[in-house]
Every structure is written in structure tokens, then in C-alpha cells.
Amino acid sequence: MSETQTGELLLLLAVLFGLAFALGGLLERWRIPGILGALFVAMAAHYTPLGRELSQAPLYDAFTFLAELGVLFLLFFIGMQIDLKEMRSLSRDIVWATVLNTAFPFLFGVAVMLWLGYGWVVAFVIGLTRMP
């Protein structure tokens, strides 16, 4: 990546960060978590000339790396917000919800494929693809 392309990437990122910061502040005034501002800006930027510029060949690799790094930081931020005491008190409900959320789509996928006349192997594979 040339020096000009690096400067262009940094300028576009500065615009995105500025918009995310401004929208985050506005959302916090309305008592909505400010982190949603960054998510809304990212979703909206995809459909603008700014998003098309970032998806072009010279900037795409660097921007994709930074986007994946941003997702990791977002997941870390969400993990830091979890109250472990509350999670322990709700552990029974969490386990049941997880089991049912996994078992029902699997069994439904297998049942539908068997009902449509497919074999067990195909039904099992399709059932696995329905699991979250």
C-alpha cells in the first residue's frame, strides 16, 4: 500500500470515527447505548460512496483487517458488560434456552427432510446446518 493510499484510508477512517462519535453522543442523550452509533454508522456507510471507496482493491485488505479487529473489540466490550453473578443465578435458564435453541432447529430440519423423502444422511446434514 502506497503512502497516498494509506493517507486516504486514514482520512476515511477519521470520517467514520467522527460520525460514530457524534452519533454515539446523540444516542446517549436519548439514553440509548452509544456503541450502537458505531454500528449504525458502519451499516449506513456500506451504502454510500464512502463504503464503495473502502471496498476497492487497494484499501480493501487493510479495511477488512481493521473491521475484523473492530468486531473482536466489540465482542470484548460486550463481554466486559456481563454481570457474572447474575449469569450464575440464571444458569439453569441459560442452559435450557441453549439446549432448546440448538435441539429444535436440528430436529425440525431432520424431520422436514425426512418428510420430503430424503435419506437419513442428507436429513442429518441439513439438520446440522439449521443449528445456530
Image (cartoon, rainbow, N blue to C red):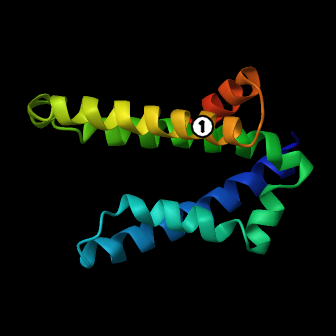
Name the residue type under label 1: Ala
In the structure shown, which secondary structural element does the residue marked by tag 1 occupy?
Answer: helix
**Disc 1: CA contacts within 10 A as few (<14), some (14-19) or many (>=20):** some
Q: Position of residue 29 (x, y in %)?
A: 25, 77
Question: Is residue 36 in view from this perspective?
Answer: yes
Q: Left of 87 or right of it: where is 63?
A: right
Towards the viewer: 41 or 108: 108
Is the residue 97 above or below the residue 43 in the image? Answer: above
- Residue at figure coordinates x 50%, y 60% from the top left: 39
Viewport quadrant of the N terminus: top right
In percent of the image, x 41 and y 39: which residue is there? 101
Residue in view at x 74 percent, y 43 percent:
116
Give residue 41's position: percent from left, percent from top: 55, 67
Furthest toward the top, the residue is 121
The quadrant in which residue 32 appears is bottom left
Residue 105: image location, x then y, percent: 52, 40
Asked whether residue 132 appears in the rendered view, the answer is no
Q: Quadrant of residue 22?
A: bottom left
Q: Which quarter of the picture shows residue 86?
A: top left
Tell me which residue sits at (74%, 74%) in the image.
48
Q: On the picture, is 73 further left or further right than 95?
A: right
Q: Nearer the viewer, residue 43 or 111?
A: 111
- According to the picture, the residue beneath numbered tag 1 turns out to be 111
Compared with 55, 3 (above or below) is above
Please state the horizontal and vertical placement of residue 5, each as a whole percent of the image. 84, 50
Q: Is residue 81 left or right of residue 123?
A: left
Count of numbered circles on the image: 1
